[in-house]
Image: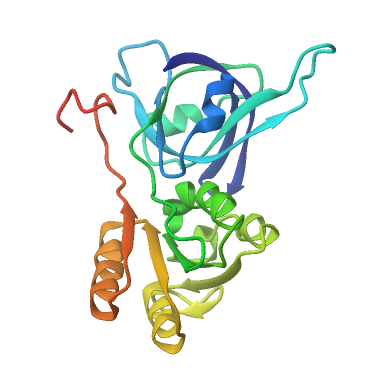
Amino acid sequence: MQFKAMIISNHEVSPGYFRMRVSAPPELADSRPGQFIMVRVRDAIDPLLRRPFGIFDVGTVASEFSGCGPQTYVEMLYKVVGKGTATLSTYHHGDHVDLLAPLGTGFDLGDPDEEKILVGGGIGIAPLYYLAKKLVEHSRVRFFLGGRTRDDILCVTEFERLGVETYVATDDGTLGDRGFVTDVMERHIRGAAGRRTIYACGPMPMLQAVAGIAERTGVPCQVSLEAYMACGMGACLG
């Protein structure tokens, strides 16, 4: 559906990374983890196309108006990389953006009795938090988070509050293990028994590494791809 959303909050969680919460229709409470939003940053030709963002979280809060029911909200986690996201980072409470949501297929939550392995790289964690919220209701969840430096490691506390066992790796060793997060994940998979499924989102080299590990170890794997697109609904063949 297409709707105008009011920005509830928009704050920087790490240098260059922002978390935005906007109001949403009640129907968005039924969004699936792994679905995404297309955001029209402003009513102008430049930037022309909407920007896709994975759904970081969906929930409800008490309305600020007496006598009104709970207000549904949706959250996005984004990195400032160009004109569109730079403009988005300047918005404040009370500003409005035009959204298309929810879009995409989303993850298959799988068998509740198996362990769930989440792997995220940098801003690739965006769809994994909402996924973790759903998975912890029935399954044990481990989260492997990687980045170039400690500034690329986002929202660890939020995952830990869900009861998710979290592992961190950085390329330069400024936080957690030094090296690739996929190496940390592979050591865990090879050292533990039982059925599990891998869920991953992040840069393409990381996803290729995760897919290779899944193939070598025989573990089912689902990935969420990050890509620019024109419409978000398939009509543009993107």
- Residue 177 position, x and y percent, is 51, 80
* Residue name at image x 64 percent, y 34 percent: 59
Closer to the camera in the image, 204 or 149: 204
Farthest residue, direction bottom? 191
Farthest residue, direction right? 66
* Residue name at image x 40 percent, y 66 percent: 197
Total labels: the figure holds 0
Farthest residue, direction left? 237
Q: Is residue 24 visible?
A: no
Q: Quick check: 138 above or below 144?
A: above
Question: Which corner quadrant holds the N terminus?
Answer: top left
Q: Is residue 136 left or right of residue 4?
A: right
Q: Is residue 80 left or right of residue 229?
A: right
* Image-quadrant location for residue 161: bottom right
Closer to the camera in the image, 196 or 233: 196
- Residue 219 position, x and y percent, is 32, 72
* Residue name at image x 76 percent, y 20 percent: 63
Q: Quick check: 98 above or below 80?
A: above
- Residue 147 position, x and y percent, is 45, 64
- Residue 166 position, x and y percent, is 58, 69
Q: Is residue 111 left or right of residue 205?
A: right
Q: Quick check: 153 above or below 8?
A: below
Q: In the rendered view, how is the structure colored? A: rainbow
Q: Is residue 88 visible?
A: yes
